[in-house]
Image (tube, grey):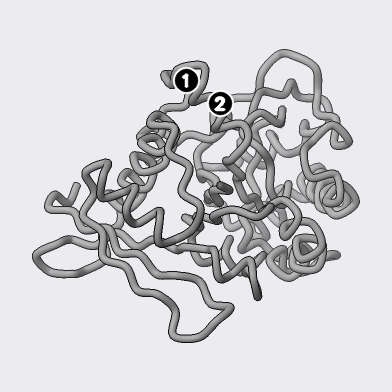
Amino acid sequence: MLVLLPPSEGKAASGRGTPLKTGSLSLPGLTAAREAVLGELVELCAGDEEKAREVLGLSVGLRGEVAKNVELLTAGARPAGEIYTGVLYDALDLASLDAAAKRRAARSLLVFSGLWGAVRVTDRIPSYRCSMGVRLPGLGALGAHWRAPMAEVLPEAAGNGLVLDLRSAAYAAAWKPKGEVASRTATVRVLHAPTRKVVSHFNKATKGRIVRSLLASGTAPAGPAELVEALRDLGYAVEAEAPAKAGRPWSLDVLVDEVH
């Protein structure tokens, strides 16, 4: 099982350990694309702060994020699972999983990123600010920048099992499973059961809880149909829609009564 996650906008502070080594990150086929984004981002943020804030979509109050990006090559690095915070990651709560579940998380979780493309939760990275929606002056739109290298690398990373896609739209645009991989991919929406409307905050929290439940239980669904049954066994209300055509992902709706 491969679980595709969005990053969090908020991030924990960088560590005091060894700085980033791009060559040590998972998915080495993305190294050149990572280094291209990293180099331009550092150069941008080390120059005109106002221009950098404009490019990154940051308010004046977030100027510290620009300064943080300047130090990306020298800042200490921490496991990505510790760097990413926010609603989904709070609900996932990787740190409190038992040893076996943590091993499953290391194998199966892949966090998408405007800067790194995608990283495992065990990859050591510094804290940064660069969303997939950013358009860098030299490289252009990051979503487009990542499509070709992702298309080369991600099908192999997906292996032969289930792909559970929990990404937001901007990150999903960087890689869309195709063909045989798409046929064993499931996307998830979280809906308020009484109204059938998409919920926002609770959407992220529920997705975090779903991933935690799968990791903690040791459940390893072979495909989307088995995922539906596994989630129901774990206590989730799930409605599933198989694709009308081959080579398309399944759509799963998880229904919740509470909206926070």
**Image spot of residue 213 (x, y percent):** 35, 36
Picture quarter containing residue 125? top right
In terms of image quadrants, where is residue 131? Answer: bottom right
The image quadrant that residue 83 belongs to is: top right
At numbered mark 1, what does the secondary structure look like: helix, strand or loop?
helix
Q: Do callouts 1 and 2 mark residues in contact (Cβ within 8 Å)?
A: yes
Q: Which of 60 and 189 is in front in this view?
A: 189
Q: Residue placed at 85% from the left, 65% from the top?
A: 138
Q: What residue type is labelled 2?
A: Glu
Q: Which of 125 and 61 is in front in this view?
A: 125
Amino acid on which disc 1 is placed: Ala
Left or right, 32 with reference to 200: right
Q: Nearer the viewer, residue 26 or 73?
A: 26
Percent from the top left, x then y, of residue 205?
32, 43
What number is the disc on residue 82?
Answer: 2
Gap in Å between the C-alphas at discs 1 and 2? 8 Å
| Residue at which label 1 appears | 95
Position of residue 256 relative to residue 198, above or below, is above
Q: In this view, does 23 lie to the left or right of 151?
A: right
Nearest the eye: 62 or 143: 143
Comparing labels 1 and 2, the label whose residue is closer to the camera: 1
